[in-house]
Image (cartoon, helix red, strand yellow):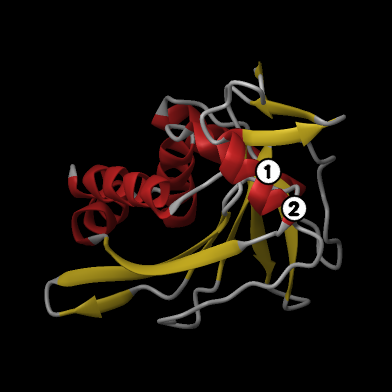
Amino acid sequence: MKIIDLKTYSRKEHFEFYTKFPCYFELNVKLDISKFYSFVKNQKYSFYGSFIYFLSKNVNLIPEFKLYLEDDKLICFDIIHPSYTAFCEKSKTFCVLWTEFNEDFQNFLHNFEQDKQFIKENTMFVKENIKNSFNISAIPWINFENFSLHLPKKENYFFPILTSGKIIKEKNQCFIPLSINVNHASTDAYHVSLFLENLQKDLNCF
């Protein structure tokens, strides 16, 4: 974790302008998960856990995604961890939990499976939250082309918010929609493009 000197911060003007006049934007894309989906299914891994791993890995490659404002100090975390929704079958509601990010894929999946034991029906937050966590949610019933999330008073929240949709199979290919919501004070479309490019490369490497 490091403190960013706002006097020398390369985005000083952008940051000050977009915190004074809050601006957020969302981008919706369709990811090709054909090779990744086949690998996960053949290995009998959790698709959701595996997808969260690669989202988290690539989020953590972008410093602009890891900013946090605390006591008027802008902090860049070394690592931010995924906080994600889990559907509760009986109550048809969801709970929120988080898993410590580990760069080792197998270790992360192990932690993910361990954390699933915290899931409780009719309970929204099942683990004590941490400040360096970013949000992931899944809407596996809907193949959306556009998803828009509206949060009030989000001007000091700089982590990306990721939402995935229903997996679509087209001939021999699989796709998944993904929405990313970011704060323009910390993040430009360029940073989002880097994230998406890196993510798609990882999903192709199977």
Measured in 3D between alpha carbons, the distance from the residue under mark 2 to the one under mark 1, in whole angstroms, is: 6 Å
**Which class describes the residues within 10 Å of circle 1: few (<14), some (14-19), or many (20+)?**
some
Q: Position of residue 176 (x, y in %)?
A: 35, 69
Quadrant in the rendering for residue 13: top right
- What label does residue 53 carry, if any? none
> Which residue does the numbered mark 2 point to in the structure image?
20
**Residue visible at 83% across and 31% down in the picture:** 72
Disc 1 element: helix
In the figure, is residue 94 to the left or right of 51? Answer: right
Say whether residue 116 is visible: no
The three-letter amino acid code for the residue at tag 2 is Lys
**Residue visible at 65% across and 52% down in the picture:** 18
Extreme-left residue of the structure: 172
Extreme-top residue of the structure: 2
Instruction: Give the total of numbered labels.
Output: 2
The answer to whether the residues at label 2 and label 1 have Cβ atoms under 8 Å apart is yes
Above or below, comparing residue 188 to residue 172 in the picture:
above
**Residue visible at 44% across and 82% down in the picture:** 144
**Residue visible at 49% across and 74% down in the picture:** 140
Q: Position of residue 48 (x, y in %)?
A: 48, 55
In the figure, is residue 189 to the left or right of 65? Answer: left
| Nearest to the observer: residue 184 or residue 129 | 184
Disc 2 element: helix
> Which residue does the numbered mark 1 point to in the structure image?
16
The three-letter amino acid code for the residue at tag 1 is Glu
Figure quadrant of the C terminus? top left
| Nearest to the observer: residue 131 or residue 99 | 131
Figure quadrant of the N terminus? top right
| Nearest to the observer: residue 43 or residue 127 | 127
Above or below, comparing residue 175 to residue 70 in the picture:
below
